[in-house]
Image (tube, rainbow, N blue to C red):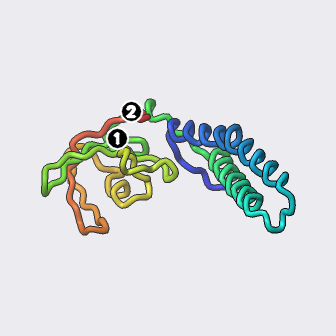
Amino acid sequence: MEKVPMTSAGYKALEDEIKFLKSVERPRIIKAISEARAHGDLSENAEYHAAKEQQGLNESRVAELEDKISRADVIDVSKLSGDTVKFGATVTLADEDTDEEVHYQIVGEIEADVKKGKVSITSPIARALIGKTEGDSVEVNTPGGGKSYEILKVEFKEHK
């Protein structure tokens, strides 16, 4: 069974989603199914079929999240240190063309969210950064073409 690397914040987010799906969504869907059953003939009851479909999707998502949690390899970023980029690092980069600074934390695939500055360990930028240190320049092939970045800072801190 392949382990799934994630930060403790990513693990907690999965637990929170499972708790929500089981304690809020599941009872809501069960109630909707009961109400739809009360309407009579189930063969032509669109509300019943929609509720059953929601139930299937909800239970499928719960199973998927429980699988990820069972395979989780939780890495406590606060216990990591050093000046080399690795999983969990928060890296400050300067675009060598525009001097614009960006910050990325390298996280597991399931918790990646570029809008929040979290990039997947399997992303092109993370793969280019792994093993590099402050002051290094990296070339990243992006869908929009190649980009050059200078690594300004490497730090290890837990993001929310």
Q: Is residue 45 left or right of residue 138?
A: right
Q: How many marks?
A: 2
Image spot of residue 27 (x, y percent):
74, 42
- Give 86 or 71, whichever is nearer the viewer: 71
Mark 2 residue type: Lys
Quarter of the figure with the N terminus: bottom right
Q: Do callouts 1 and 2 mark residues in contact (Cβ within 8 Å)?
A: yes
Which residue in the rendered view is the most extreme toward the top? 78
Which amino acid, by three-letter code, is at mark 1?
Thr
Badge 1 or badge 2: first in the primary sequence = 1
**Residue 2, numbered label:** none
Of the pair 50 and 148, the residue shown nearer to us: 50
In the image, 130 versus 140, the foreground residue is 140
Residue underneath mark 1: 90
Disc 2 target residue? 157
Disc 1 from disc 2: Cα separation: 7 Å
Identify the residue shown where x is 30% and y is 49%. Answer: 132
The image quarter containing residue 103 is: top left
Which residue is at 37% across, 41% downward?
89
Q: Give the x, y percent position of residue 10.
A: 52, 41
- The secondary element bearing badge 2 is classed as loop
Tell me where residue 53 sits by quadrant: bottom right
Q: Residue at x 60, y 37 (%)?
A: 16
Q: Position of residue 47 (x, y in %)?
A: 73, 58
24 horizontally vs 98: left or right: right
Give the side of residue 117 with respect to residue 133, left or right. right
Q: Residue 22: x, y in percent?
A: 70, 41
Q: Is residue 52 left or right of residue 130?
A: right
